[in-house]
Image (cartoon, rainbow, N blue to C red):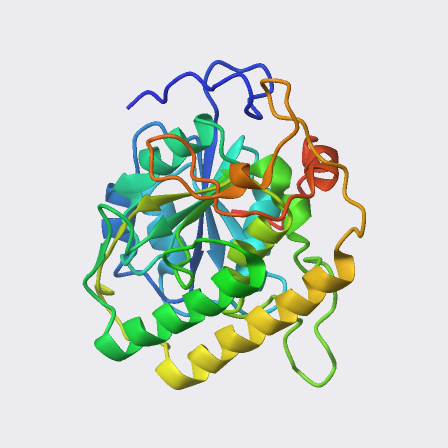
């Protein structure tokens, strides 16, 4: 499909239609890639496969399926580092992050892009918003997700419907605001991951987007079961890791909060009130965050200079 013309308030850099980069972290996913690549929309500009040290034919299969794929080798370990390396290699106006196991549906990408074009800075998929569903989540995990969702909404003044889901899309120009660990930073000598290098990345990105005052939208998304292989998800271990991430990010926000923020002015000329930060369920962009730091957001709206770590043929 051809993406609609961006609205006047987006980061389109003078182009009539934004270019789209898709980042796919992968570790031994050779059997799943044919399904994932086959469902990518035809108008995707760039596919970045981030390899985490696969010992199967993941990289070879990706190149067979899509000769123009950009293969990046992550610099440390963990999904967070893989995504950061992928983001750095992107050249598109919009970045979409999906999984290589078939659980996220690439055919939904146009829904995310349309939301960004409508004025959002960051769009997250929701399995529990209108049109969303999960074929994979258990009742226990759903209860845990609802509880973690509630904690975030109370602490950050947000109205997320699905915190723990990693299907996201955003303008490449806001990547610096996510403040991810530098991809060239060395791994600690004791073997630990840097904060943000692990699975906490999905919760971290969602919270930071809202805490930084980005215009955050949600779209209903259908989560499928992994096609081949086994998931490394552990309900209790990963639930506690998400909870730790939430409180860590809350402390970070409190330390970074400007005590006298400048009240932004809406496009129609009047000062923005707190009512502007209440989520809406209209076709327009959902405003999920009430805490605004537009000075930081404006400063981030510059071209990103990627530092890719690509695998040569």
With respect to residue 295, does 147 lie above or below? below
With respect to residue 216, does 83 lie above or below? below
With respect to residue 270, does 52 lie above or below? below
Can the viewer see residue 54 in this picture? Answer: no
Q: Residue furthest left?
A: 135
- Front-most of residues 291 and 303: 291
Say left or right for 222 vs 50: left
Q: Quadrant of the N terminus?
A: top left
Count numbered badges in the picture: 0
Residue 127 lies in quadrant: bottom left
Say left or right for 108 vs 201: left
* Image location of residue 157, percent across then percent down: 54, 56
Determine the residue positioned at 70% across, 31% down.
Answer: 302
* Image location of residue 117, percent across then percent down: 45, 26
Residue 84 lies in quadrant: bottom right
Can the viewer see residue 145 in this picture? Answer: yes
Determine the residue positioned at 32% across, 20% down.
Answer: 2
* Image location of residue 66, percent across then percent down: 35, 40
- Front-most of residues 277 and 112: 277
* Image location of residue 194, percent across then percent down: 67, 71
Determine the residue positioned at 61% across, 25% down.
Answer: 266
With respect to residue 303, does 164 lie above or below? below
Determine the residue positioned at 72% across, 59% down.
Answer: 184
Residue 171 lies in quadrant: top right
- Front-most of residues 71 and 18: 18
Say left or right for 307 vs 243: right
């Amino acid at each position: 499909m051809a993406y609609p013309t961006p609205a006047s308030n987006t980061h389109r850099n003078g182009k009539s239609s934004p270019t789209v980069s898709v980042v796919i972290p992968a570790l031994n996913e050779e059997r799943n890639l044919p399904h994932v690549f086959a469902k990518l929309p035809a108008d995707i500009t760039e596919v970045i496969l981030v390899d985490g040290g696969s010992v199967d034919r993941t990289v070879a299969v990706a190149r067979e399926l899509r000769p123009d794929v950009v293969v990046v080798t992550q610099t440390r370990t963990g999904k967070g580092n893989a995504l950061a390396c992928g983001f750095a290699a992107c050249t598109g106006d919009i970045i979409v992050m999906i999984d290589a196991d078939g659980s996220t549906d690439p055919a939904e990408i146009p829904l995310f892009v349309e939301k960004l074009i409508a004025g959002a800075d960051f769009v997250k998929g929701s399995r529990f918003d209108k049109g969303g569903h999960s074929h994979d989540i258990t009742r226990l995990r759903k209860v845990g997700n609802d509880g973690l969702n509630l904690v975030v909404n109370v602490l950050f003044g947000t109205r997320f419907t699905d915190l723990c889901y990693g299907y996201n899309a955003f303008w490449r120009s806001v990547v610096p605001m996510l403040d991810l660990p530098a991809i060239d930073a060395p791994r600690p000598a004791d073997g630990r991951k840097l904060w943000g290098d692990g699975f906490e990345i999905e919760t971290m990105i969602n919270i930071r987007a809202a805490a930084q005052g980005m215009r955050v939208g949600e779209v209903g998304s259908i989560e499928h079961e992994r096609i081949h292989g086994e998931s490394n998800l552990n309900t209790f271990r990963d639930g506690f890791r998400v909870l730790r991430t939430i409180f860590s990010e809350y402390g970070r926000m409190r330390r970074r909060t400007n005590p006298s923020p400048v009240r932004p002015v809406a496009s129609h000329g009047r000062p923005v009130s707190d009512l502007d930060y209440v989520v809406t369920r209209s076709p327009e962009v959902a405003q999920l965050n009430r805490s605004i730091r537009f000075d930081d957001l404006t400063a981030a709206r510059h071209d990103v200079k990627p530092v890719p770590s690509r695998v040569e043929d």
